[in-house]
Structure formats: structure tokens, C-alpha cells
Amino acid sequence: MTARTTRRIPTAKSRLAAVGALAAAGALVLSACGDQTDDSGDSGTKDSTASASAYNLPKKIQDAGVVKVGSDINYAPMEFDQGGTPTGVDVDIAAAIGKELGVDFKFENGTFDNLIPSLDTGRYDVIMSAMSDTKERQAKVDFVDYFNAGVSILAKKGNPEGIKSVEDLCGKTIAFQRGTVSADVAAAANKDACASDKIKTLTFDTDTEALLQVKQGRAVADLNDFPVAAYNAKTSGGGNDFEVVGEQIDEGPYGIAVTKDNAQLRDAVSKALDAIIANGEYAKVLEKWNVTQGGVDKAVVNGGAE
């Protein structure tokens, strides 16, 4: 978000995401139709009854054989639509977890800032959508942390404004997806470095719309998570539309969100994540998408610190 959510105050740190490293195949983010169900993300399950029992999955999920996943499927390379089928880092990690648990993880598309409310109503069993684990969100849901990312600045190719840091955005207009950590980055800058010359913001339901503002010159930069920024820089316009500038801002964990009253499912997912880390399936996914720099060594519950 962007580590995608509302979370941290920007403290320029971490390494610059290597744009060239994210040469994942595929076109720029394909627009997904809002709140439409897509039956994809099959996990190729093994002995489902034995696995589900071994991991103590909730009976409702054991009986259904499916974990319903809420996701904003418009955020390549983490999750995006490819020919009507969700694909990406999150989809592949979910499939590996599902195989371990003996159930299918089925991704359903929704608007990002409506995912937690929809989880609360029972529409989804979990959320997996490059969602940052933050203290604010921990008040509503529990997270199983599975990836690390910081915020990157994506400018027009050639960086005509000479942007090198958040401070260089003072007095300028930026664009980002509504409900993401980018809002916190801009707000924190406007209270501090840009207090006398505030950053102006344009917010949209999807990151694709925010990127268009930069491409058309209505915004000088888009803020989003390092894998997403680097992927777009590599793929949009054949690599001629955007470039990542400056360093990552405030790296933190992505989490799989589960309701507070569903510790049984949370713990099963956590154990299965540890299992695929140990057996190498997790590493295979990160290598496939060239995002190994975001990998974690073990599952952590509610590890977001800010």
C-alpha cells in the first residue's frame, strides 16, 4: 500500500524495490468488475477430510470444502484478473494453503474498503487482498501475516517533477486507491514536512483509476505497495509509462484477515502457512512472481506494530 490499508506514519526506510526484478508475465492490471463473484483460485486439494480434521478447521468449512476469500482483484501482481480468472501472489499463496488444509480457497471480488464490513456480515470467511496488518484494523479483525511490503512512489516515466521522497510531493497532487495506507502517508506528510504547502490528493475505488491520473498528467505520482508499483512500472505501456522513485516508505506486514470470533480458522490458516513455508511451496510462489524480498520466515498473528 501501498501496503493496502490505513496504517503507518511514513519514515523513509527499507530498500528500493527493484523494478527489474518484477518481470512477472502479464499485462497491466485488468479492471475487475466490482463486487462480482469469480469461482477461481482452486487449490488442488489433497485428502480433504484428513487435512481439515488435522488442522481443526471449523466444521462449517470442512463440510463446504471451501474458504470464501474477499479480495479487490485489481492489484497486480498481488491479485488481478487474467482472462476472467483471479491470479497473482495472493491467489497462489492461498492455493498452497488450501492444498495443505484440504479445502479450496475461492476468491470473490469486492471493493477494497468494503472488504472488512463484508467479512463481518459473513459474506467472506477471510480477506486476502494485500491488506496491511495495522493496529487500527486489529481492533476489528485478526491477521495472519504472510508478506512484507512498504509504500513506493510511482511517477511518470522520466520523473519530470524530480520526485525523490514524500517531501517532494508538497504542494503537488497525487492519486491513490481509497482506503489504502497511502492516505496515512499523505496525511502524515501534511502534518509535518508539508504542513505549509500541503499535498493535494485524488482518491479512487481502484488503483487503475489512480494510475490513469498520473498517466494523463492530473497527478504527479501514485502511491502504492512496492510489488504493485514495480509491476506497473515494468508492464504499463511496455515499461514506458511509469517509474518507481525514491525508497520504500515504512515497510510492514500484509495479513490474511479473519473475524475476531473465528480463532479456530485463524489458527488453522496460521499453521498451514507455517507448513508451506517449511515445505518450500511458499518460496516457489514468491520466486514465480519475483517478490522474494517480501517473504516471511514464519506465520505471525497480529504482528503489525503501527
Image (tube, grey):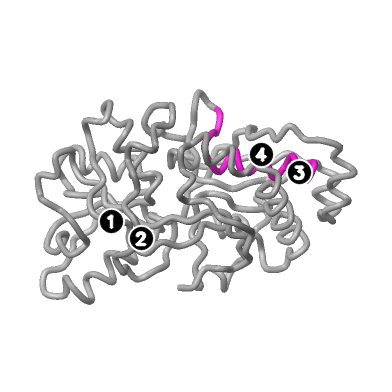
Mark closer to the observer (4, 1): 1
Marks 4/3: CA–CA distance: 9 Å
Q: Which residue is mark 4?
A: 95
The residue at the point 34 percent across, 48 percent down is: 17
Q: Quadrant of residue 99?
A: top right
Mark 4 and mark 1 lie on one chain; the one further toward the N terminus is: 4
Residue 281 vs residue 1: left or right?
right
Mark closer to the observer (4, 2): 2
Disc 1 element: strand
Position in image of residue 178 (x %, y %): 37, 55
Q: Which residue is mark 2?
A: 14
Disc 3 element: helix
Disc 2 element: loop
Amino acid at pointer 4: Ala
Q: Which residue is mark 3?
A: 100
* Crowd band around label 4 with a 10 angstrom C-alpha radius: few (<14), some (14–19), many (20+): many
Position in image of residue 38 (x %, y %): 60, 34
Marks 4/2: CA–CA distance: 29 Å
Q: Which residues are magenta?
A: 85-102
Disc 4 element: helix
The quarter of the rendered structure image containing the C terminus is bottom left
